[in-house]
Amino acid sequence: LSRNEGMVRNSFIYYGDAIRDYDSVLVHNPNHMLAYGNRGMIYGTLASYDKKYLKNAASDFEKAIAIDPEYADNYYNKAWVDLMKGDTATACELWHKADELGSVVAGQAIAKHCR
C-alpha cells in the first residue's frame, strides 16, 4: 500500500467506529440532533471518496434539520452534500438559509458557488 492508501484505509476504520458510536447514541435518543448532524458530516467526508455515502449524509442532515430547524450548521453541511450531488441551486438555497440563521461561514460558500 502507498502511504496515502494506508491513511485512507485507517480513516475509514476510524470513521466506521465513529458512525457506530453515533448509531448507539441514536438508539438511546432518536431525537439527538447533534448525533445526526455529526454522523452526517462523517458520511459527507466518506462521500468525497465514495459517492454511495451521499444518501446517508443527506438523510442525516434532513433528520437533524427536522429536529431543530433553527440550527444553521445542518443547512450549511447539507448544502455541501447537495453540491456534491450536482444540485447547486438547492445548495445555494440551503447556504442562504444557514446565513439567515447566523452561520458565520455560509457567506463564503455563497460567494464562491452561488450567482
Image: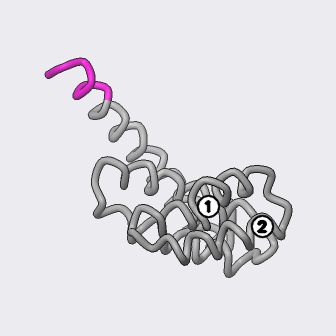
Going by the numbered disc 1, the residue's amino acid type is Gly
Q: Nearer the viewer, residue 61 or 80?
A: 80
Say which element carries label 2: loop
Q: Which residues are magenta?
A: 1-7
Q: Which mark is residue 105?
A: none
Cβ atoms at labels 2 and 1 below 8 Å apart: yes
Which residue corresponds to the image point at 76% horizontal and 74% vertical from the top-left? 68
- The way the protein has been coloured in the rendering is one colour
Going by the numbered disc 2, the residue's amino acid type is Tyr
In what quadrant of the picture does the N terminus appear?
Answer: top left
Q: Which mark is residue 71?
A: 2
Q: Nearer the viewer, residue 7 or 28?
A: 7
Q: As displayed, is residue 101 above or below residue 35?
A: below
Q: Is residue 45 left or right of residue 13?
A: right
Residue 107: image x %, image y %?
A: 74, 56
- Magenta segment includes 28: no
